[in-house]
């Protein structure tokens, strides 16, 4: 122990004749600029690579520099379907099962059909939004 309560760590010294092994990571094997399906994606003002004579043809797609570290737009359009809906949403849909009376969509009870109007309006609104989104997404 040294004065002041600090300890000295003994570092293991390597043998001078031992070759050093380079540390590798999983990302070293795959280049960031590796073509996907024969297309190379470039960001910002990167140049499309070619050979020294400029004779090699490389298909490049250019995207803004801000998109470099984001999920690609092709993967961002996620539509919630019953198959990939969360359990919380499924449970919320089951909350009204078996209810009767005013505000429910049931054949039992006074004014029970009023809930059917609300359900139909909600369904129509959801379908209109989906149709408008599909119309805007058409290239």
Image (spheres, rainbow, N blue to C red):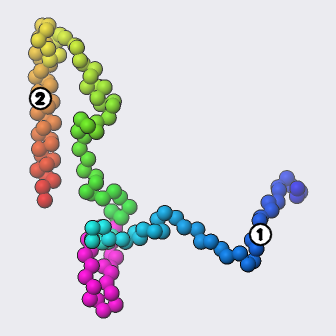
Kindly give the residue lying farthest to the bottom in the view shown: 53
* Labels 1 and 2: the sequence-earlier one: 1
The residue under the point 33% across, 81% down is 49
The residue depicted at 10 percent of the width and 15 percent of the height is 113
Q: In this view, does 115 lie above or below 40?
A: above
Task: Say which residue label 2 marks.
Answer: 121
Q: What stretch is highlighted in magenta?
A: 44-65
Splitting the image into 4 quarters, where does residue 59 fall?
Answer: bottom left
Q: For the residue carrying disc 2, how many other residues have a C-alpha within 10 Å: few (<14), some (14-19), or many (20+)?
A: few
Q: Which of marks 1 and 2 is in front?
A: 1
Give the SS element for disc 2: helix
Q: Can residue 62 be seen in this view?
A: no
The image quarter containing residue 82 is top left
Q: Where is residue 77 in the image (x, y as percent from the top left)?
A: 25, 50
- Examine the image and state in which quarter residue 75 appears: bottom left
Image x and y of residue 58, in percent: 27, 79
Query: On the rendered image, what quadrant is the N terminus found in?
Result: bottom right
Mark sitting on residue 13: 1
Main SS, magenta region, reads loop
């Amino acid at each position: 122990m040294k004065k002041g309560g600090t300890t000295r760590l003994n570092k293991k010294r390597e043998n001078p004749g031992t070759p050093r092994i380079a540390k590798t990571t999983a990302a070293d094997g795959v280049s960031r600029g590796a073509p996907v399906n024969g297309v190379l994606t470039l960001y910002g003002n990167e140049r499309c690579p070619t050979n020294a004579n400029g004779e090699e043809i490389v298909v490049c797609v250019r995207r803004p520099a801000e998109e470099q570290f984001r999920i690609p737009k092709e993967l961002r359009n996620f539509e919630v379907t019953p198959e990939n809906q969360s359990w919380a949403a499924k449970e919320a849909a089951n909350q009204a099962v078996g209810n009767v009376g005013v505000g429910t969509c049931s054949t039992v009870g006074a004014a029970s059909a009023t809930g059917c109007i609300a359900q139909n309006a909600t369904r129509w609104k959801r379908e209109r939004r989906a149709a408008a989104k599909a119309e805007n997404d058409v290239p």
